[in-house]
Structures are given as structure tokens and as C-alpha cells.
Image (spheres, helix red, strand yellow):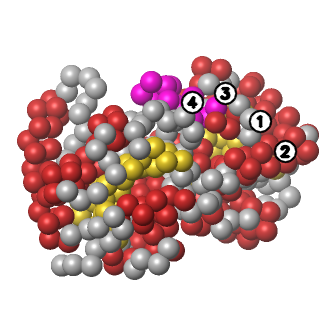
Amino acid sequence: MTGCFAVVTGGGTSGHVLPALAIADSLVVAGHPASSIHYVGTQRGVETSLVPPTGYPHTFLDVVGLQRSLSRRNLAFVPKLWRSVRDATALLRRIEPRVVVNVGGYGSFPATWAARRLGIPYVVVSYDRRPGLVSKLMAKRAAACAVAFPGSTLPHATLTGAPVRQEMIALERGAARAAARSELGLPADRFVVAVMCGSQGAAAVNDVVAGLVDRRSADTGLAVYHVVGDRFLGQAAPARDGREGILYRVIGYEHRMASLYAAADLLVTRGGAGTIAELATVGAPAVVVPWPGASENHQVDNAKVLSDVGAAVLVEQQHLTVDRLDDEVQRFRSEPVALAALARRAYEEGALHRSGELAALIAKVAAR
């Protein structure tokens, strides 16, 4: 099999898969056939459901991450890693990509290591303010490192912005709002708060939102669209139809993210790098609650990219209470000028993400 332009590799969670797919889409927009973009991920990650519908050729390897705590799963780490590198090497020999693009995470290691062994140039894409372990390991011999924020410590760093899906780059929130609310079953005349904390959800945030819904149960001007995470769906607070008070929608996972960004007046999110980049790209006002379990608490650094310039509200999880969330929601409901300013500043911060610089750097490396 020949004619492969790029292998895009990474996976496990939507925080790696969605940026990888965004890169693949940007290469297609730049003129490369979708059939020439090959995705390499893991057999256990969310990519097994997200990638096949896209039509991109793909390979899922039997690789697992190294557990930070003592775990029997670590016994399988080395043999699975060795076999996955072997399988990735065989794959790259067969399809002969001109470039490999690493989006980070343990799922990106086998194909990137195989590229190094075979002399295929590779690009490390680092969209967190603090690079992850695999990114740091692979950066030394990378042909280039594409970074989302200035001041990166990675070698060969080029400021390109983060990988963001084309539907986000093209989104005009104001123009799309009515259609988005209709699609999601949300009324046109309510203040809509959308809550989404990654593909896994967040129990601590879910509990606070449930408390807010109870407090505002009689509020006929408020709607909350809550993506709780599939694992928490059975434990979620009951939905409310809005006929006599608040409208409260509860779902496990939402794939129509462009519609959700357009429909919401205010978002409540985690501080993953992909989420921060999307908030800026589309110009969505948000209360960002970083996940405190992130390595080196890097989600706080991600969130500060926006909050430090007045483009988002940063509330660390230990400070997120029903009172605090209610205060933020009511403040922005009563101050539309402040809400619009938050959105405008976020959009200004998203200019680099919308620039196409990342696809251009990948094409430059592939042409060497």
C-alpha cells in the first residue's frame, strides 16, 4: 500500500482523539485526500468509536498506559509496548508515510518510536501549556514541535496554535444560535448554561450543578444542558421539563459540540487544552474548573491562558460551590455587556488556532 501522506497518532481519551481528528481534517482542507491520512491509536480508547465513522484509514494497537500507582496492569505494560512498537514499525514500512504527527499520550508512543527507527520525520504537537511525558521524550529528535502557547521549553518549537476541528473554526455563534437551540431542543428565550467536563464527566462538578438546579428550580428563565458523562448518567439528578420552572437536560455524552457552543450563553468546563482552544476559537464565554488530578495541575495553567486576559472565569475545584456557581451565572445573566466582553476576548485569543499554521508546518516537514 502506498500513497500515505501522514500518520496521525494518539488516543485513549477524547482529549487526544479530537485534536488528532482536527489535524487530519486540516490536512484534508489543505488538499490531501482523506485516504492518505492514517490514524493510529489504541484498542481501548474512545477512538474505537470516534474514528471509524470519519472514514479515515486507521489502526488500533494493543497498548496500555503505565499506571501511576501500583497496579497489576503495569505487568503487561512492557510486553504490550514492545509488541505495539513492532506492529507500528510493520505498518509504517507498509504504508510509507511522508510524516508522522504525534498528538501526545501513551497511544502515540508506538508509531512515533517506529518513525524514529525508520527515519521518517515526525512532528510533536503539544497543545498543553506544560508538555506531557511522551511529548517531552519524543521532542528531542522531532523534525519540529508545534506548540499552542509562546514560551515553550520544547526544542524546535514553532508557535502554530492548537489543533481545532474545522466545524469550530467555521462556527459563527450568533448566526448559528437559533438553529443550534432547535437542534438541541432548547428554548430561544432562556439563559442557557451548558456544562461539559470532557468525555468522562466530573462528579464534583456534577454535584454542584445539581445543587444549582435545586436552588433555581422555580426559575422559568434558566435552562441547564448538562453533559454528565456516561459513567455518571445513572447517578445524575433527574431532568426537569421546564413547564413550571427550570429546564434541566441531562445526557451522558454530546458529540454535537459546535451546536452546544452556539446554543449556550455561558459554559462550565474543565481546563483541558483542547477545550481551552475550542472556547477561544469559537469565542465562547466560560467558567473553567480545572481538574485538580491533572499531572502537575497543568489544567490551571491552560485555563490561565484565557482567564489572565479576561477571556474566561477561572474557578478552582476547591472553590466551586453552589453559591459560587450561582453567583457567576446570575452575574452574567444580569450583565450582558460583561458576558459579551468575555466572549469577544476569548475570540481574540483564538486567532492563532484559526490560522492554519499547524497544517502548514506539517506539510513543510513532509516536504523535506
Name the front one of labels 4 and 3.
Answer: 4
Q: CA distance from mark 2 to mark 1?
A: 8 Å
Pick out the residue farthest to the front.
368
Q: Amino acid at mark 3?
A: Val
> Is the C-beta separation of discs 2 and 1 under 8 Å?
yes
The C terminus is located in which quarter? bottom left
> Is the C-beta separation of discs 4 and 1 under 8 Å?
no
Label 4 or label 1, whichever comes before in sequence order: 4
Kindly identify which residue carries mark 1.
310
72, 22: nearer the viewer: 22
Label 4 or label 3, whichever comes before in sequence order: 4
| Mark 3 neighbour class, 10 Å CA radius: few under 14, some 14 to 19, many 20 or more | many
* Residue 92 visible, this orientation: yes
What's drawn in magenta, residue-wise?
A: 290-304
Label 2 or label 4, whichever comes before in sequence order: 4
Q: CA distance from mark 2 to mark 4?
A: 22 Å
Residue 341's disc number: 2
In the image, residue 276 lies at what x, y percent? 60, 44
Q: Against 164, is 221 above or below? A: above
Would you say 325 lies left or right of 93 here?
right
Q: Residue at x 67, y 51 (%)?
A: 350
> Is the C-beta separation of discs 2 and 3 under 8 Å?
no
Would you say 246 lies left or right of 88 here?
right
